[in-house]
Image (cartoon, grey):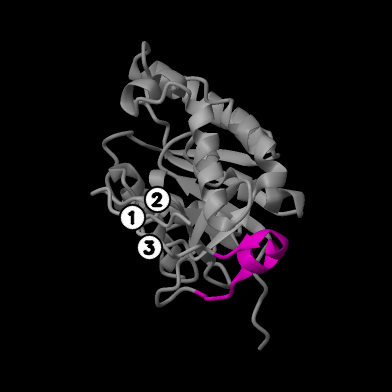
Amino acid sequence: MQTPAFPRNVVAFAAHPDDTEIFKAGTLVLLAKRGWKVTICTLTAGGMGGIGSDEATTIRIREAEARKAAAEIGAEYFCLGGRDGYLYDSAELRMAVLSLIRRQQAGIIMTHLPNDYHADHRTTCTIVDAAAMLTTLPNCPVAEKPLERTPLFYHSAPLGLTDPLGNAMPPPQFYIDIGSVEDRKMAMLAHHQSQIDLMRIMHRMDDFFGEMQKQDRSWGRLAGCEFAEAWWQHLGGGFPKDPLLQTELADFLKTPFTGGPNHEP
């Protein structure tokens, strides 16, 4: 029997609104331009990320920002209702992620790295990893039918390419040159106005959007282009190994520099 093709649907999971725009949006713009259906999902609404607004108000603000950012590229946005800062791995969230993956008929899923600097990011990765493993299995307690193939699974970079202890990550497996769509990525990120004060207080960033563009430029230096995003493919047992993202975006594919302790050329 012929193996079914991966659907041209990508679901990007993140812990909070703005995570997708910071770490993945350039790559998602390129996929959308090639006709891929893009879905953005956050496991929380980022309710702790408000300065001068209470949690309920912050949730309303940040969900609206996330929907507007997704709309920039015609993407759907979903929030699964976990609590920002108190995100725990649970059967309920695993089933919610699984249901969304099946409902959106994902061919590719994306999320944070398992050793990301942020605890909510690490928890999100654990939940998505566990749910993804079950996508083809019929006994799962969700209404949606199993997928024909387990989706391909990719991880985006953390801030500074460092782990929770500040150690340099192993070099990314590959980069995607996003120079041609950096403006679109920044237009998506610009909808997250509520985070300007938060990033100033939490990360001492006086220019949130400017610092995020510097990040893309620093990854670009490592990739040999102006702006880039960094990626790892999840190649563990049970997951397909097809390099679909790399093939789909072959014109933008860059290999990493591996010469220095912090990956600086």
Residue labelled with disc 2: 161
Question: Whole-percent x and y of residue 259?
Answer: 43, 64
Q: Quadrant of residue 48?
A: top left
User: Does the magenta portion include 49?
Assistant: no
Q: Three-letter amino acid code at disc 3?
A: Pro
Q: Residues within 10 Å of mark 3 (few under 14, many from 20)?
A: some
Q: Which mark is residue 244?
A: none
Q: Which residues are magenta?
A: 240-255
Q: CA distance from mark 2 to mark 3?
A: 8 Å
For residue 125, side relative to residue 250 (left or right):
left
Q: Nearer the viewer, residue 265 or 128?
A: 265
Q: Which residue is mark 1?
A: 168
Q: Are marks 2 and 1 in contact (CB under 8 Å)?
A: yes
Tell which of 201 and 257 is nearer to you.
257
In the rendered image, which residue does mark 3 sit on?
A: 170
* Secondary structure at numbered mark 1: loop
What secondary structure is found at the residue carrying circle 2? helix
Mark 2 residue type: Leu
Q: Residue at x 47, y 34 (%)?
A: 17
